[in-house]
Amino acid sequence: MSNRFAITVAVLIGVLNPGWAGAALREVVVSHTDDQGILQLYRMKEDGTDSRQLTFSKTGCRMPSCSPDGKKLAYVEQLGGGLALRVADLDGRNARTMVADGMNLLPTWLPDSSHLIWMKVSPQPKQDPARNSKLFIMNLSTGEHRRLFTNPEQRKHSNAMPTISPNGKRIAFISDRSGDMRLWVSNLDGDGARLLSKPEQERHETIKAPIEQKVPAWSPDGKWIAHWEGVEMIHMSQFTGIPNPERDRQIAATFHVWIVSSDGKRRRKVGRGDDPTWSPDGFVTRAYPEPRRGGPLVMVGTKTAEKAIPIVPPRRNWGRFDWVPNTP
């Protein structure tokens, strides 16, 4: 499974000097493999120091999401043949399973820190899991959850990879409503949905595959949405079963992070990479492969440039990360 569901990455340390001296270090919760090769959650400073292991799973934890109030942590853990939705205190204690059945992915919080939205997929062989996805919402106080979007027309299509606006009134998501997977926005109930962005090219002329959009992330000020754009990994050798290293390199070269204004009027490329997020002070984070370290380079923007954040040890796989919110 891809990590736009479970992409494996590590970070290049020492190639770029992040220049931490004098900087106020923020914290992250990151999923990376332990000494036994199992994905665990760790909390650490952005320079990779003060790392504390939060989970001790026998099967693997990934896709951490910190609540806006900085008190809770949502993530998914492999249980049996599925991925369970779990919620714990931010220190990893008092973890409980909220949804045990199915393949639950990419939990995201509403601003009240009391509701979660996530995607549930029903994967089919050799098919992008996002093509068969539904969105759900849960009230953590009661444990009750329901499918998001009630209109039958909305439910005809796959809806995946949710991200919530800072005011909690709108949702950005990926859908195949226009054919290929594209970035859409709507009210939280699904009304007022519109296509927000589309690639400059619908298909890659050399690879003969569609250019798609995935993994949206709303900026803290609500003005921008970052997303991945490129040819999906299901067209690579590891998924097709047909070795073609040159085609794989061509596909990887299409992976870029873009940002689009929340009104859809402005759009620009940030750089190569995948899995975009936003730092608490409003800069885009992206990751891209760095073979010399056996994984990717994780970069975050600054006021003047970008810097590498060494949040994954060398030669370790990862399962995404999230920034710990700045709270009083």
Image: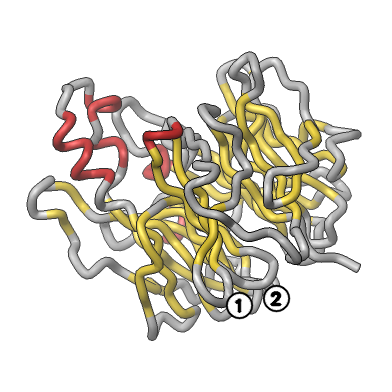
Residue drawn 29% across and 36% down?
Answer: 234
Q: What is the number of the mark on residue 222?
A: 1
Q: Label 1 to label 2, Cα distance in Å?
A: 8 Å
Q: Position of residue 233 (x, y in %)?
A: 31, 39
Residue under the point 29% across and 25% down: 238
Q: Visible in this render: residue 152?
A: no
Residue assigned mark 2: 167
Residue 102, x across and y down, in percent: 58, 29
Outermost residue to the left = 206
Q: Position of residue 103 (x, y in %)?
A: 56, 32
> Which quadrant of the rendered structure holds the N terminus?
top left
Mark 1 vs 2, N-terminal side: 2
Q: x, y (%) of residue 223? A: 56, 80
Q: Residue at x 51, y 56 (%)?
A: 299
Q: Tell me if mark 1 has few (under 14), some (14-19) or many (20+) residues whose alpha carbon lies within 10 angstroms of its own.
A: some
Which of the 4 image quarters holds residue 242?
top left
